[in-house]
Image: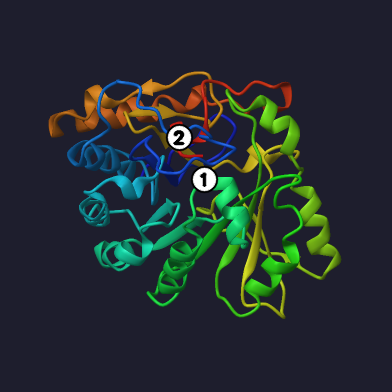
Amino acid sequence: MTILTDRFGRSFPYLRLSLTQACNFRCSYCLPDGYQADGKSRFLDRDEVLRLVRAFAALGMRKIRLTGGEPSLRKDLPQIIEAIAAVPGITRIALTTNGTLLPRHVGVWRAAGLTALNVSLDSLDAQRFHAITGHDRHAEISEGVEMALGLGFDSVKLNAVLLRGVNDDELPNWLEFLRERDLAVRFIELMRTGDNADYFARHHLRAQFVEEQLVAAGWTLRQRASDAGPAREFQHPDYRGRIGIIAPYAKDFCAGCNRLRVTARGDLRLCLFGNFGIPLRPLLQSDADHETLVARIATQLHLKSAGHGLHEGNTGITPHLASIGG
């Protein structure tokens, strides 16, 4: 089987596929004014998604993460999951969601073939969560997470964006939460995007702040799987749960990059903060274009840079994280 590699020797078994840019939350760090439709072409339909996944699978892609915006807004999400699960070579299908529809749909997604679940939960405090997201849905999300823990997923993870002066004092509460729950919480360092410069200046906190506290408390680094995401994951013998740290501003963060991205309108993005997209949608209209599509994807990896330009303030063409799925 062909394996996608770039000129820096990195291999890519992991695709993050956005199903929509729409989101029903108004998170302060992403879409504080809510989602605004841009009037451009519709998002990829199920057949286009399936052709795309088949092409990446032919190139050695094993793991697909479905993202948004908020992917659960797609009414055909169960059918998309089921179709991807039937593609030879795909062994893991993950979903990143804000969790509001978990109580109603998580069982259906699991039955369709979903193997891993990530839920955004920026605070364990309901009032703080409301202030960050603009929605009072903490109880439903918490209910859905507890349901998911009983459905046999390979992994259930919670994502919390670190925000200085907002939720940076919650580590003790998270530790207590993880003591008896077999899941991971990942603390994500706030990233600068095209439209959040002022917010970033006020609330950016280096992820090293949390990592140092964990090491001091006896948490140790786990070995990273080849198709894992960007988190450095820590464990402790006294806790069932685990803690991941995603630190995009850390030295050599990009050296371990193993994922590519495709936007909801079919553009291949080689980096979350890249300066260009490679249109694949014209080759997603017919099964007859499969070989041409495979070739186009395979020949683009030489354009991937060694790293992002965040340290220089270069956020590329990403206006906000909902536009590409984070």
Instruction: Quote the CA–CA distance across marks 1 and 2.
Output: 9 Å
* Three-letter residue code for mark 2: Gly
Image spot of residue 18 (x, y percent): 38, 39
218 or 72, nearer to the observer:
72
Specify the quadrant of the image occupied by residue 149: bottom left
In the image, 226: left or right of 173? left
308 or 169, nearer to the observer:
169
Image spot of residue 117 (x, y percent): 44, 60
Give the crowd class for mark 1: few <14, some 14-19, many >=20 residues within 10 Å: some
Specify the quadrant of the image occupied by residue 25: top left
Q: Which residue is mark 1?
A: 134
Rendered residue at 51%/60% (across/down)? 138
* In the depicted structure, whether residue 114 falls above or below residue 195: below
- Residue 40 visible, this orientation: yes
* Three-letter residue code for mark 1: Gly
User: First in sequence: mark 1 or mark 2?
Assistant: 2
Give the crowd class for mark 2: few <14, some 14-19, many >=20 residues within 10 Å: some
Q: Are marks 1 and 2 in contact (CB under 8 Å)?
A: yes
166 or 178, nearer to the observer:
166
Mark 1 element type? loop
Display coloring: rainbow
Q: Which residue is mark 2?
A: 34
* In the depicted structure, whether residue 192 falls above or below residue 121: above
In the image, 221: left or right of 300? right
